[in-house]
Image (spheres, rainbow, N blue to C red):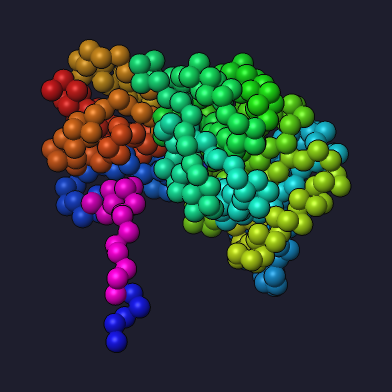
Amino acid sequence: SASIFAAVEMAPRDPILGLNEAFAADTRAEKVNLGVGVYYDDNGKIPLLAAVRAAEKARLEAMPPRGYQPIEGPATYNNAVQNLLLGKDSALIANGQVVTVEALGGTGALKVGADYLKRLVPGATVYISDPSWENHRALFESAGFPVDVYPYYDAETRGVNFAGMKAKLESLPAGSIIVLHACCHNPTGADMSDAQWEEVVAACRSRGLIPFLDMAYQGFADGIDADAVAVRAFSASGLQFFVSSSFSKSFSLYGERVGALSIITAGKEESARVLSQVKRVIRTNYSNPPIHGGAVVAAVLNSPELRQQWEDELAGMRDRIRAMRTSLVEQLKAEGVAQDFSFVIKQRGMFSYTGLSAAQVETLKTQYGIYAVSTGRICLAALNSKNIGYVAKAIAAVVKG
Ligand code: PLP
């Protein structure tokens, strides 16, 4: 008899993974992959932070037993996450208004949040930025929500189309879920100003929207507290909201899958009920989170010395990306490019929307072995002192035609 899989169709390839496969197969020595979404150091390697190494060494020496964790993860980890997001003196934390559960990276946090929201507001529509991280749509659709967009990026100004965004938010039905990039917008690198965040908060309040902040790059723009401006604006508002957060980038712990979902409620007793429901979502999915990554992050955040060392290392990553932005702009100018690329310096986080067309991106690949996403998104953290000259020359040649 026929296999039960006989009629299964091939799913479409993930565009970024497809890019990585093509890059791996490219035999040119000078090839550069700007399509990635990870931070590489100046040697083109994913760093293992010294603070992480110290915490892992201590764990290895202690050889702790590996019992089950609480469904929501350990309090040492969840409390540290809350302090990082809301500030350690947050009244919301003191009042018991913050529910935090450890999750499998930022993606896992989004999915636990999405699955819980599907129980809470089953008829809602989810709105994501146009454009957004490509997994946002798929993830909320897989949780059963219809997903639509709000205007975000303005290709003319290379900034945020704030008037368009605000008008859209103010037109949405109450109970709509609105996914916001808390900082370092992926893929555009265009963030809102503090004043614009206040207007977003006001729109969420007046329309009764459910904000879901996605914080995957805390510390990559200006620093831990500065990058939490959106979270802090919402926390001062008295509204209820969701935050997914991730240590993949800030701790360079991509494969350990360390993140968290935090939900801000109206009070302590409400928090207990919400937590009990979120725990059901986790229990019926993966039961409880793995130990290692969260234990390492908690050990670093809860030790004054390791925490300082981590903040210094995080600042090092942030500064290196900034230096690559400045250097790329200067080198393009030095190559005689007439077009003004200074917007690359203003964009924040790991990415830049360069404005390169799909055809230009294709030429970069075929003629120079330089890989980027067809939207023109490049990862600045993939540039280093050895490859930036080559990349600048190639981009210059391509834009000059
Ligand atoms: N959200 C955004 C906007 C991202 O860019 C990413 C990672 O690329 C994530 C969430 C997911 O992060 P994680 O790798 O921790 O699942």
Q: Position of residue 42 (x, y in %)?
A: 38, 39
Q: Nearer the viewer, residue 385 or 22?
A: 22
Q: Residue at x 49, y 41 (%)?
A: 147
For residue 192, which quarter of the picture?
Answer: top right
Give the residues drawn in magenta, as a range: 6-22
Q: Is residue 215 visible?
A: no
Q: Residue at x 30, y 25 (%)?
A: 355
Q: Position of residue 326 (x, y in %)?
A: 38, 22
Q: How many marks?
A: 0
Q: Nearer the viewer, residue 34 or 60?
A: 34
Q: Nearer the viewer, residue 28 or 43?
A: 28
Q: Position of residue 58 (x, y in %)?
A: 66, 60
Q: Quadrant of the C terminus?
A: top left
Drawn side of residue 226 relative to residue 383, left or right: right
The relative height of residue 163 versus residue 144 in the rendered view (above or below) is: above
Q: Is residue 161 highlighted in magenta?
A: no
Q: Is residue 9 highlighted in magenta?
A: yes
Q: Position of residue 87 (x, y in %)?
A: 73, 34
The relative height of residue 1 versus residue 21 in the rendered view (above or below) is: below
Drawn side of residue 3 relative to residue 168, left or right: left
Q: Residue at x 48, y 29 (%)?
A: 150
Q: Quadrant of the N terminus?
A: bottom left
Q: Residue at x 31, y 55 (%)?
A: 12
Q: Is residue 97 visible?
A: yes
